[in-house]
Image: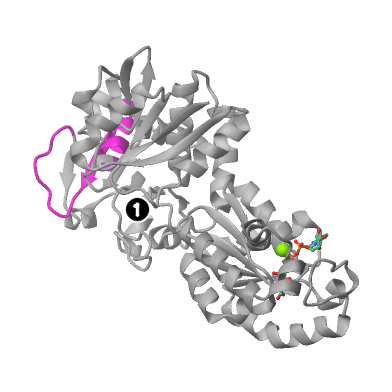
Amino acid sequence: MRFYGLLGETLSHSISPEIHGFLFRQLNIEASYSLFPVPPDKLADALYGLILLGSGGVNVTIPYKMKIIPLLDELTDEARALGAVNTVLFRNGRTIGYNTDYAGFGLMLKQHGIEAAGKTAVILGTGGAARTAACWLSDHGAANVKLVSRRPAGAGRFDVLSYNDLTNLTHTDILVNATPVGMYPHIHETPLAKALLTRFGVIIDLIYNPLETRLMREGREQGIYAVNGLTMLAAQAVAAEEIWQGRSIAEELLEPVCEFLSDLPEHTHNLVFIGMPGSGKSTFGRLAADRLGWEFCDTDPYIEQRAGRSISEIFRLEGEEAFRRLETEAIREFSRRRRVVIATGGGAVTRPENMALLEATGRLIYLDRPIEIIATSNLTGRPLLNGDKGKLYSLYEARKPLYERYAHCQVLNKYSLERVLDSIFEDLKRRSN
Ligand SMILES: Nc1ncnc2c1ncn2[C@@H]1O[C@H](COP(=O)(O)OP(=O)(O)O)[C@@H](O)[C@H]1O
Ligand SMILES: O=C(O)C1=C[C@@H](OP(=O)(O)O)[C@@H](O)[C@H](O)C1
Ligand SMILES: [Mg+2]
């Protein structure tokens, strides 16, 4: 199986594994994409190690986009011009450095029908992302491209303005925010005052968390077309796959990747299902995990496997207390993992210790299946109920306030599987913005 990945220093927040996992599934390719965090003095060892082990290629991120260059055999023109590499192809023992952030910027403009030729542009920031945007625009015929810095210094290829200079600015076609101002958790900040935005034709904010920054919102309020950084994030990954797989896929897959990404819940958090027995935690846990390309972890089967007996036998032979101890162990183990969807048992909410672990690991979704529906469904294998509907109602009365208290969101489960799954992702999206 081919393997790819991301080289960087701290990577746990990256969503590249989700994006490339999605692309592999769409392309029907048996391949994996992993995070390879390495300390600066191990960059060369990591690169050579990956080649030796037969990797197909890697992405490179901060702080190694420049540092990797002397380690490579060849560079494309744009990687050389930008002095930065974010994608490496390993082919026949040689290493070739590309910059798909550059290609991604272009794909993003195309996707949104934004032309560069003859246009004027102002780019906030002077870092790697700002230079990538400036180079692409000017390489593709923009009439005038200016960067803006809090401390304008050495001009290089482009003029650098100060923020004060912007008050004298006449109409400009394209505004690009390539600074982190407005990014989560500082979502109330904006790089440019609302009153200045009317001078711009379109606003491109390279930030994708949140999906609508304050800059974008204030632009839209004044009728200006605004684009977030999601398409560029998707496009640089699509462009990297084009290089690794040696075929063009952007036409076909850029839009589906963007859709997939806008559905992703806040990616640093696992998902956890809570709710009554029979509410659908195991069912929707597996469906959500499949949609995200994450691992599915269900506490009950895990406990059964470790104990070597069924849940009913554990209750009968060892008692509920013993079961609850095993359940807490399962929750502790699952909470340590990343990129997992966890289905708990209906009684997990009764131990505060469980809930502290689960709250720290992710977003808690309360699956609210009407109790009358649960009462008419098959509840075998659930020893606490034992076919006793009265017991079901009394458990519900006792636990309902707990589910409601702990949940970050509550999803009514009385529709088709597809419809409920969609509403789970809708709700998560709303919470993370
Ligand atoms: N929206 C739904 N549509 C159809 N069947 C459902 C729905 N939600 C749950 N079910 C069914 O209810 C039963 C209990 O679901 P399960 O996932 O085992 O619940 P839990 O893990 O919460 O105990 C399963 O047979 C499941 O297929
Ligand atoms: O509600 C409970 O206390 C229990 C629920 C069951 O899981 P489900 O909620 O998946 O049925 C299982 O953990 C055990 O029978 C105890
Ligand atoms: Mg279950």
The x and y percentages for residue 350 are 62, 81
User: Which of these two is toward me, 305 or 21?
Assistant: 305
The x and y percentages for residue 156 are 13, 34
Residue 351 quadrant: bottom right
Is 333 located above or below residue 205 in the figure? Answer: below
Q: Residue at x 56, y 72 (%)?
A: 408
Q: Which residue is situated farthest in the top direction here?
A: 92
Q: Residue at x 18, y 38 (%)?
A: 41
Determine if residue 107 is in view: yes
User: Position of 268 compared to 294: left or right?
Assistant: left
Neighbour class for label 1 at 10 Å: few (<14), some, many (≥20)? some
Give ligand 3's quarter of the image.
Answer: bottom right
Residue for badge 1 = 199
Is 81 located above or below residue 148 in the figure? Answer: above
In the structure shown, which secondary structural element does the residue marked by tag 1 occupy?
Answer: helix
Q: Which residue is situated farthest in the front direction here?
A: 317
Q: Which residues are the magenta region?
A: 129-157
Is 33 located above or below residue 416 in the figure? Answer: above
Residue 395 quadrant: bottom right
Residue 193 quadrant: bottom left
Q: Residue at x 70, y 64 (%)?
A: 281
User: Position of 268 compared to 85: left or right?
Assistant: right
User: Position of 111 compared to 57: left or right?
Assistant: right
Q: Which residue is situated farthest in the right direction here?
A: 376
Q: Residue 151: say if magenta.
A: yes
User: Which of these two is toward me, 289 or 146?
Assistant: 289
The x and y percentages for residue 210 are 44, 59
The x and y percentages for residue 49 are 31, 27
User: Position of 316 compared to 221: left or right?
Assistant: right
Residue type, mark 1 in image: Arg
